[in-house]
Image (cartoon, rainbow, N blue to C red):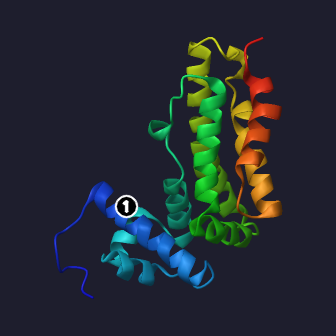
Amino acid sequence: MDHRKGPRRRGDELNRAIFEAALDELVEVGYQRLTMERIAERARTSKASLYRRWPGRAELMLDAVVNVFPSVEDLADTGELRGDLLAALTSMAHALNSPVGAAARSMLADLDVQRETMKMHRDRFIEHRNQLMLALIRRAVARGEARTTALTPRIASVGPALMRDHFLSCGAPIGDEVIAEIVDQVLVPLIKAV
């Protein structure tokens, strides 16, 4: 299909189409068989459009996977620390439990041997995740529920790291009971104001 047929997309609209195409392709063929050409065809754009944004498939896929996870703006505000933590981790678990999560797991296993690509993963994905959790902790601090000393990247990374560990060692799905254990046994005691 000629990508030039139909209305021209730019900016966020084109990026959304590319991310959707990339993730669909990842689920369908796996990371090993993933090509920029097929992603471009599926997104109805040119390979040049992809290469203007990303130097290669690893960078594109890392951004596409990050795009599936909730952003700071998407965070539910339940009015209390425990509820916010449950909502945030449940949202992350839904992404990990999806077909995209399974495909991303295999992609990350593939990328594990590539040090530079894994550094990109940390820089993009983990920073995104930490900012999400820091925003949630900031809200709890403002409500008087959390210690100001809990506003550190290390503390922000604890809940998602425990979920990732469960996901990588046990696979999907990450059930509600696992999320509740992480929140109640680790995060609330670690973060709450004394």
Locate residue 41, reporting x and y percent.
Answer: 36, 82
Q: Position of residue 175 (x, y in %)?
A: 72, 53
Local packing at callout 1 (Cα closer than 10 Å; few below 14, some 14-19, many 20+) is some
Front residue (pair 99, 157): 99
**Based on the displayed image, in which of its 4 quarters is residue 127 positioned?**
top right
Amino acid type, label 1: Arg
* Residue at 29% across, 56% down: 11
Choose between 105 and 81: the one closer to the eye: 81
Outermost residue to the bottom: 1
Which residue is farthest front?
177
Q: Residue at x 75, y 27 (%)?
A: 188
Relative to 175, does residue 26 appear above or below in the rendering? below
Is residue 5 shown left or right of residue 120? left
Query: Compared to 7, does 77 lie above or below?
Result: above
Indicate the position of residue 156 as horizontal and vertical percent values.
Answer: 69, 34
Q: Is residue 123 visible?
A: no
From the viewer's side, name the closer residue of 171 and 175: 175
**Residue 188 visible in the current orientation:** yes
The image quadrant of residue 32 is: bottom right
Picture residue at 68% right of the left edge, 17% below the top: 146
Q: Answer above or below: position of 90 versus 79.
A: below
Label 1 secondary element: helix
- The residue identified by callout 1 is 16
Would residue 9 be found to the left or right of residue 115 on screen? left
Tally of numbered discs: 1
Locate the C terminus by quadrant.
top right
**Residue 139 position in % (x across, y down):** 56, 22
